[in-house]
Image: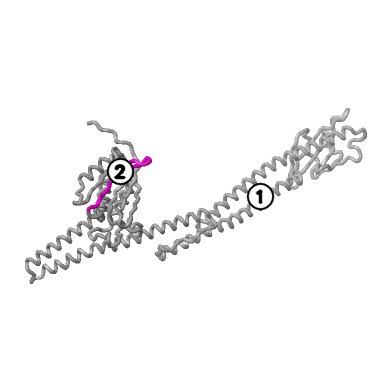
């Protein structure tokens, strides 16, 4: 069953149930009120007319006595049940039941009967009987009217429910058709149309389009990733294949074969470096989170820089505040430093400087690695975190895969750090990472 039809059915059932409850409650309440009013009207009419009989000085009943008052049939009886005079809708030989409202059925219709003793001096055998229909005209009509009115309202409500639900689900049906069209066509460049008539559906369409944007970006990156990996692997494999064929040629000298083996060895090392880089990057990129613990990154950074093999002529300057503690993973943090310092050295100028600073800033720890090398253009800076992105020739390095800064970004994500890069051509690059400060780890005693 369709979603809209299901809502219509459920709402209609609920509306019908509520209508039935209202009608039943109205019927019960109306019947109770009707019975009470009929009883009261019957008793009041009989007693008031009995007062007229008590006050009369002539014959009982007096001439001109009205036997039909407000729909109540009145009759004068003797105590032995003998009828004197009166008006009645049915049998007249009912036993006298003094002061009790009872009911009888006449031709299938229900009536209430009330007998009242008339107070006459010297006589105790005169009774005034009142008989009234249980429907009592207007009261019964009122109950029937309420029931009919509730039924009409229920029908109108169901009609409005069907109309409103069909109108409400119309954009959902349109979205469903558009989603099916995207699925069948396998064209993730398509997007859902706007839904201006409904805020929630408009937000849903916007979220779905955002998801499609993300998926399209992932697919494009995957295609480019596959293409770039194939390109990176093709070159060394081609060289290895050609050199192997060359070396296997029986007419080649030993020195030629040795030279071919040397080329094969170098290209094999390059293949291993490429696969190791890909495996390491994939391992980090696929991790959702890392186990972090309070780490003194001041000491860790000092130790790393002390062991780093800076090339001759490249000076490393440090401005490291002591005792800066953040939540980190030691291996990931060292790998982060490795990539950033490698880049600073690789793209720095000859005889230049690499400046590493670490300080507390407004409740956070700021780690910065800066060089005074070739820098980057705005275009390169805009794509620096994209996988396999190759910068302009001045920054290209055929030995790399273009994964360095993508790797840095993934590590920063796992460490919960924010990364910011500023650069200018010919002036150098500064990479800043900010971490949330943490409490120093408690000393352990063995």
Q: Residues within 10 Å of mark 1 (few under 14, many from 20)?
A: some
**Which of the two residues, 383 or 240, is positioned nearer the viewer here?**
383
Position of the C terminus, as image quadrant, is: top left
Q: Is the magenta stretch mostly helix, strand or loop?
A: strand
Asked if residue 243 is among those painted magenta in the image, a careful observer would answer no
Q: Residue 388 lies in what quarter of the image?
A: bottom left
Residue found farthest to the right: 58
- Location of residue 116 (image quadrant): top right
Instruction: Looking at the picture, tell me which residue is in the foreground, 212 or 81.
Output: 212
Q: Is residue 317 above or below residue 82?
A: below
Position in image of residue 278 (x %, y %) = 25, 56
User: Residue 358 has which mark?
Assistant: 2
Q: From this viewpoint, which residue is outermost toward the bottom?
A: 251
Image mark for residue 245: none
**On screen, 125 above or below 268?**
above
Residue wearing tag 1: 150
Could you say whether the residue bearing mark 2 is in a helix, strand or loop? strand
- Marked residue nearer the N-terminal end (2 or 1): 1
- 180 left or right of 46 in image: left
**Which region shows up in magenta?**
351-365
Q: Where residue 177 appears, x then y in whole percent?
A: 47, 62
């Amino acid at each position: 069953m369709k979603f809209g039809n299901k809502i219509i059915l459920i709402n209609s059932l609920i509306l019908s149930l509520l209508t039935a409850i209202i009608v039943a409650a109205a019927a019960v309440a109306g019947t109770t009120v009707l019975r009470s009013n009929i009883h009261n009207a019957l008793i009041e009419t009989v007693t008031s007319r009995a007062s007229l009989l008590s006050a009369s000085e002539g014959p009982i009943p007096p001439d001109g006595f009205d036997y039909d008052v407000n729909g109540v049939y009145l009759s004068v009886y003797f105590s032995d049940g003998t009828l004197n005079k009166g008006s009645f809708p049915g049998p007249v030989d009912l036993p006298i039941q003094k002061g009790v409202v009872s009911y009888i059925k006449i031709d299938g219709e229900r009536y209430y009967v009330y007998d009242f003793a008339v107070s006459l001096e010297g006589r105790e055998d005169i009774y005034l009987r009142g008989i009234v229909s249980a429907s009592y005209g207007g009261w019964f009509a009122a109950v029937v009217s309420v029931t009919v009115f509730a039924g009409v309202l229920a029908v109108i409500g169901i009609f409005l429910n069907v109309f409103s639900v069909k109108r409400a689900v119309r954009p959902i049906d349109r979205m469903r058709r558009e989603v099916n069209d995207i699925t069948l066509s396998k064209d993730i460049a398509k997007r859902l149309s706007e839904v201006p008539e409904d805020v929630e559906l408009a937000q849903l369409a916007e979220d779905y389009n955002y998801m499609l944007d993300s998926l399209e970006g992932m697919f494009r990156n995957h295609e480019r990733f596959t293409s770039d990996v194939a390109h990176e692997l093709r070159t060394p494999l081609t060289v290895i294949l050609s050199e192997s064929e060359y070396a296997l040629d029986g007419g080649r000298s030993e020195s030629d074969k040795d030279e071919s083996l040397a080329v094969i060895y170098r290209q094999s090392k390059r293949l291993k470096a490429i696969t190791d880089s890909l495996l390491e990057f994939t391992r980090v990129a696929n991790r959702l989170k890392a186990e972090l613990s309070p780490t003194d990154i001041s000491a860790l950074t000092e130790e790393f820089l002390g062991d780093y093999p800076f090339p001759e002529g490249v000076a490393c300057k440090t401005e490291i505040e002591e005792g800066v503690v953040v939540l980190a993973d030691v291996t990931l943090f060292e790998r982060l430093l490795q990539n950033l310092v490698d880049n600073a050295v690789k793209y720095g100028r000859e005889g230049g400087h690499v400046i590493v600073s670490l300080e507390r800033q407004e409740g956070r720890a700021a780690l910065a690695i800066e060089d005074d090398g070739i820098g980057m253009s705005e275009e390169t800076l805009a794509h620096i975190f994209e996988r396999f992105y190759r910068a302009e020739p001045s920054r290209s390095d055929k030995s790399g895969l273009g994964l360095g800064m993508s790797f840095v970004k993934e590590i920063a994500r796992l460490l919960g750090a924010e990364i910011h890069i500023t650069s200018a051509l010919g002036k150098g690059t500064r990479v800043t990472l900010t971490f949330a400060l943490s409490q120093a780890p408690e000393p352990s005693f063995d």
